[in-house]
Image (cartoon, rainbow, N blue to C red):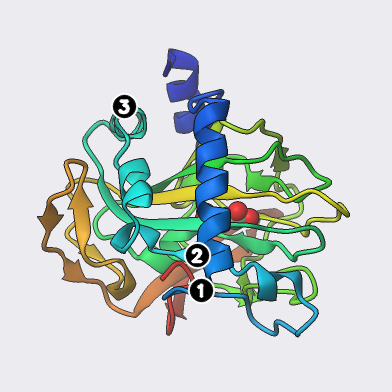
């Protein structure tokens, strides 16, 4: 299922899509399950977004976070042997699992401004990697993922304010004028894998009747010693717990400067993460 082309794309571009990694039957099971959980009411970690109004579609369908801590199907998905094999191949060693999330992204919902996951996870040493399973076909109309090709080679950047009319989170990163921001068009059952330094996010769902649901796992490199406080306990891919240290809440970050007419990143700023949006 994982080909040399996938491995090469992860190395070169910072992401890849493994097509039809999950069957449509499995996808239906996840949709039924999470829609039922959502209808049952609120759960720990629900987050409708910064500046959500009563009419915000995310009020009715807030994102779920860390469901694997109380939902067995989420735990099984996070530790699924197919995901385990893919991540081990991309990272060169077994990862540790630290987070699950379910985005419903109903029609009209805002997206999540472009960001780097390691801004939140603050893995040391190394970085994180995400597995993003499409539960609906997704394209630009319903707010598919967007990635900045090759940005996994960047350090974590200092954040700036996001546009809250487009994003339910409040920080983003500045991009150079030639940044290659690409939509990732996917079918239900495809899995997008991406590096924790890769700048990514999504724009609003502009459709009138299409959800853009996704089931997401966040993983860290297996020899990491620290991760942000919202991601404990980390799990080995056999489900056993690993004790890790808590990484500091403020970390160094990069800013764009111009050198000989070319934008380059200089590390020297400080990012302070008060709350993990992936918490
Ligand atoms: O699904 C989205 O729109 C954004 C997801 C994301 O940024 C993430 O999984 O890190």
Q: Is residue 249 left or right of residue 255?
A: left
Residue 64 numbered mark, or none: 2
The local secondary structure at tag 3 comes to helix
Question: Which mark is in front, 2 or 3?
Answer: 2
x and y, in percent, of residue 188 in the image: 63, 33
The local secondary structure at tag 2 comes to strand
Ligand 1 location (quadrant):
bottom right
Give whichever of 96, 116 is nearer the camera.
Answer: 96
Quarter of the picture holding the N terminus: top left
Residue of label 1: 46
Residue found at x 42% / y 19%? 2
Quarter holding residue 108: bottom right
- The span from disc 3 to disc 1 (Cα, nearest Å) is 32 Å
Residue found at x 64% / y 46%? 148
x and y, in percent, of residue 248 in the image: 28, 77
x and y, in percent, of residue 238 in the image: 16, 41
In the displayed structure, 177 sits above or below 110; it is above
Quarter of the picture holding the C terminus: bottom left
Residue found at x 65% / y 63%? 112
In the displayed structure, 51 sits above or below 264; it is below
Give whichever of 256, 157 is nearer the camera.
Answer: 157
Residue 243 visible to the viewer: yes
In the displayed structure, 178 sits above or below 265; it is above
Give whichever of 155, 191 is nearer the camera.
Answer: 191
How packed mark 3 is, by other alpha carbons closer than 10 Å (few <14, some 14-19, many 20 or more), is: some
Residue 255 visible to the viewer: no
The local secondary structure at tag 1 comes to loop
Quarter holding residue 103: bottom right
Give whichever of 253, 21 is nearer the camera.
Answer: 21
Residue of label 3: 89
Q: Is residue 11 left or right of residue 125?
A: right
- The span from disc 1 to disc 2 (Cα, nearest Å) is 5 Å
């Amino acid at each position: 299922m994982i080909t040399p082309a996938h491995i090469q794309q992860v190395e070169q571009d910072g992401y890849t899509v493994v097509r039809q990694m999950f069957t449509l039957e499995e996808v239906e099971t996840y949709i039924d399950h999470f829609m039922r959980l959502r209808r049952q009411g609120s759960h720990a970690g629900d987050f409708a977004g910064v500046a959500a109004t009563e009419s915000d579609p995310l009020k009715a369908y807030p994102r779920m976070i860390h469901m694997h801590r109380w939902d067995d199907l989420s735990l099984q998905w996070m530790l699924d042997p197919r995901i385990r094999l893919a991540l081990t191949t991309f990272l060169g060693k077994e990862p540790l699992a630290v987070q699950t999330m379910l985005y419903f992204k109903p029609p009209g919902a805002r997206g999540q401004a472009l960001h780097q996951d390691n801004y939140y996870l603050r893995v040391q040493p190394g970085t994180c990697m995400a597995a993003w399973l499409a539960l609906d076909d997704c394209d630009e109309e319903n707010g598919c993922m967007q990635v900045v090709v090759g940005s996994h080679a960047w350090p974590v950047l200092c954040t700036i304010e996001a546009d809250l009319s487009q994003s339910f989170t409040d920080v983003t990163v500045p991009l150079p004028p030639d940044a290659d921001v690409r939509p990732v068009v996917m079918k239900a059952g495809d899995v997008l894998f991406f590096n924790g330094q890769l700048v990514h996010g999504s724009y609003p769902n502009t459709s009138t009747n299409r959800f853009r649901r996704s089931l997401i796992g966040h993983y860290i490199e297996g020899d990491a010693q620290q991760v942000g406080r919202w991601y404990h306990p980390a799990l080995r891919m056999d489900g056993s717990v690993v004790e890790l240290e808590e990484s500091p809440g403020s970390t160094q970050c990069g800013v764009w400067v111009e050198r000989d007419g070319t934008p380059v990143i200089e590390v020297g700023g400080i990012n302070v993460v008060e709350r993990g949006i992936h918490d």
